[in-house]
Each structure stands twice: as C-alpha cells, then as structure tokens.
Image: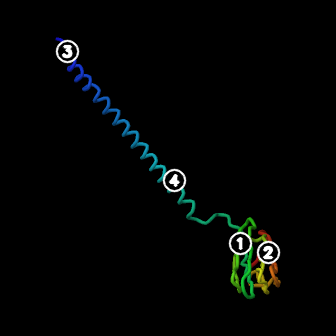
Amino acid sequence: MQKSATDATITDAAAEKPVRSRRADRAGLIAGAAVLAACSGLVLYGVLDSDQGEGEPEHRAPTASVTYEVTGEGTADISYQARDESGKATVVKAAALPWHATVDVPLGQDPIVSIVLGEKGGQARCTVAVRGRHVQSATATGTFGRATCSGTLPGTDATGG
C-alpha cells in the first residue's frame, strides 16, 4: 500500500506531539523544582538567621554606669564615650542645654565627654560621675569654647561596685 503525502504529514505530526508534550512537562517540572528549591532556601535562611538574634551574646564586657552632664544655656556639640568596646564616641550635634545622659561604659575604657560651643559663644560646664560619684568637671567659655571631662575606670580584671 502506498502512503500519500497527507498520510505522512499526519503520521509525523502525531509522532511529534508526544515528544513536545514530554519536553513541556519536563521544562515545567524543572521550573517547579527550581522555585521549590529557592523557597526552601529562603525558609531555611530565615530559620537559621532568627536563631542568632534571639539570645544575648555570651561574652559581654563588664561595664560601669557613667553619667555625663552639660549645663549652661543655648546649644553645644557634645561627644561622649558610651557602651562601645572599640572606644568610638557618640556625637550629639547642637544639643539643647542643659543636657545629661547615663550610659554604661566598658571597664578599661575611660569615660569622657567633650563640649564645643557654637559661634554665639556663651558658657557651659561638663561633669562626669562614675557609679554616682563625681569625678571631674570643666567649663567652656566664649565663641567655639571647648571643655573636656574624663574619668578612669578599672580594667576588666578588677572587681567592684
């Protein structure tokens, strides 16, 4: 029996249809697996990351309570040592006076507060108290006047309260 050209086309088209369908199914399956893997990775990251932030760090440096105070009128730029083991200062620009802050300072770091008056000048006084005990005071006067107050904390091997 002889096949006509139309019979060959129908047969070839019928033979290709299952191959295309399998390719589409395989591509869909691969895309679905990739999406599932990405979602699983995000969920796993979220679970692992949330465990790290829940507790306090096991090693925290012992600290002492330090009160910084700046009295006067107007404003001043103030920088002071707070709970930062690297020794970096916290800066408050144009703080309204009077100003005060009580912070924890790691033992071994020297508590320090510095003030700088603005171009209007004036007068301001800084004080430092460690664990409620006055340590030092200084006065800044005039245009861009400056003053610094500091104290000394024992090292981390010292005990006390």
Residue 76 vs 38, above or below: the answer is below
Quadrant in the rendering for residue 97: bottom right
Q: In which quarter of the image is the C terminus?
A: bottom right
**Residue drawn where x is 69% and y is 77% of the image:** 103
Q: Which of marks 1 and 4 is in front?
A: 1
Residues under labels 3 and 1: Cα distance? 91 Å
**Residue drawn where x is 38% and y is 37% of the image:** 27
Residues under labels 1 and 4: Cα distance? 33 Å
Describe residue 5's horizontal placement relative to residue 136 as left or right. Answer: left
Mark earlier in primary sequence (3, 2): 3
Q: Is mark 2 on a helix, strand or loop?
A: loop
The reply to whether the C-beta atoms of the residues labelled 3 and 2 are less than 8 Å apart is no
Q: How crowded is mark 3: few (under 14 residues within 10 Å), some or many (20 or more)?
A: few
Q: What element carries label 4?
A: helix
Q: Nearer the viewer, mark 4 or mark 3?
A: 3
Q: How crowded is mark 2: few (under 14 residues within 10 Å), some or many (20 or more)?
A: some
- Residue 136 in percent (x, y) is at 82, 83
**Residue that badge 4 annotates:** 45
Residue 81 vs 134, above or below: the answer is above
Dot 1 amino acid type: Thr
Mark earlier in primary sequence (2, 4): 4
**Residue that badge 1 annotates:** 90
Q: Please tell me which residue lies in front, 154 or 9.
A: 9
**Residue that badge 3 annotates:** 3
Mark earlier in primary sequence (4, 3): 3
The reply to whether the C-beta atoms of the residues labelled 1 and 4 are less than 8 Å apart is no
